[in-house]
Amino acid sequence: MTTKTAAANAGNLIITGVVLMLLGDLLFALNDAMGKWLVASFAVGQVLVIRSVGAFIVLGPMILRQGPMALFRVEQKGLQFIRVFMATVDVALFYAAVAYLPLADVMTFYMAGPIYIAALSHFFLGEKIGWRRWLAVLIGFAGVVIALRPSTAMLSLPSLFGLAGSLAFALSLVMSRYLRSTSDTTLVTWQTIAALVTGIVLSVGHWQPATLVDWSGMLLLGVVASCAHLLVTRSLKLAPASLLAPLQYTLLLWAIVLGYLFFNDIPDAQIIVGAAIIVVAGLFIFHRKNLKETVPTEAVPPDGH
């Protein structure tokens, strides 16, 4: 295979990764809006249980095709556990936050995910970043503080849930990239099982009767969420995490649109300012990453951007 052919194939894989990430983000936004609607009437634990059952509608055939025993033949079990734990914390805290806060507010906290990923990728994935991107990381954190509203409100549990959930989300994505040799089915199945177990524990004493529409909504939530996870997991195997991370900002746009359409939520000025700072910082990180990989090596400054 010639160098040009190899480069073209690599470029096609990266483009595919980008498309899959965009589709996954769209499904995640739909999942988030559906989750907000459901946790307004049902406990987070109950939603997690039925959501997990619904996810196996998608995962079941995939597990049978690869063989159930393949779920237990995984690399680096310690890191697998950490990833599953972080993914479960992410989902639980997101639903806990969105039950009390507008969808756009919670998604603003989650938009800091690419900022965290850039920093974490430096240490865990060997995707080195220089002082300019570190400065952008700090500016992004400043945007998070503004969005949190520098007052006693920033210590409210829903806000802290959103902030902690976004960090768990970023860590789970970094672990997904690190464990990319593990099959998508295995990665998503274990985090679904963990969410099911967590939901069972949290739903004790909080289970409520539901209509057929409610049950269907919770099952559909699982189908949408599992498809989104599969798309994002696959995208992270095809393209660098720091390249895909800025695409997460499309979630904020979808959150504003869906929040207005379904819940009549309109983000206030402080959320918009904080979100804008986070997005600009994240896009700068993306720009420097892209520039470093496309310009000739001899033209790259010694600090590596």
Image (cartoon, helix red, strand yellow):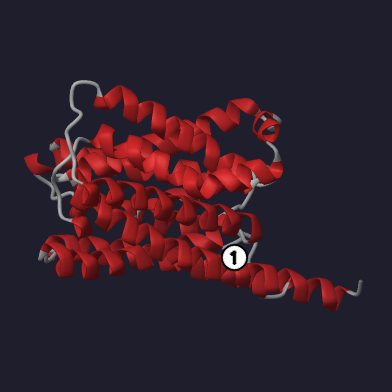
Q: Is residue 23 above or below residue 164?
A: below
**Residue 289 point in image, percent of width and height:** 56, 65
The one nearer the camera, 115 or 85, is 85
The one nearer the camera, 218 or 21, is 218
Residue under the image location 58 percent in, 59 percent down: 235
Q: Is residue 42 above or below residue 213?
A: above
Any part of residue 174 in sight:
yes
**Does residue 36 appear to the left or right of 193 in the view shown?**
left
Q: Would you name the residue on which mark 1 appears?
A: 17
**Which amino acid lies under the numbered mark 1 shown in the image of this protein?**
Gly
Q: Residue furthest left?
A: 152
Residue under the image location 14 percent in, 46 percent down: 40
**Does residue 195 appear to the left or right of 131 in the view shown?**
left
The one nearer the camera, 220 or 240, is 220
Residue under the image location 25 percent in, 57 percent down: 33
Image quadrant for the N terminus?
A: bottom right
Any part of residue 130 in sight:
no
Q: Residue furthest front?
A: 212
Residue under the image location 14 percent in, 43 percent down: 41
**Does residue 154 appear to the left or right of 172 in the view shown?**
left
Image quadrant for the C terminus?
A: bottom right
Q: Residue furthest right?
A: 1
**Residue 265 point in image, percent of width and height:** 11, 63
Quadrant of residue 115 in the image? bottom left
Q: Does dot 1 land on a helix, a strand or a loop?
A: helix
Q: Is residue 50 above or below residue 239?
A: above
Quadrant of residue 78 in the image? top right
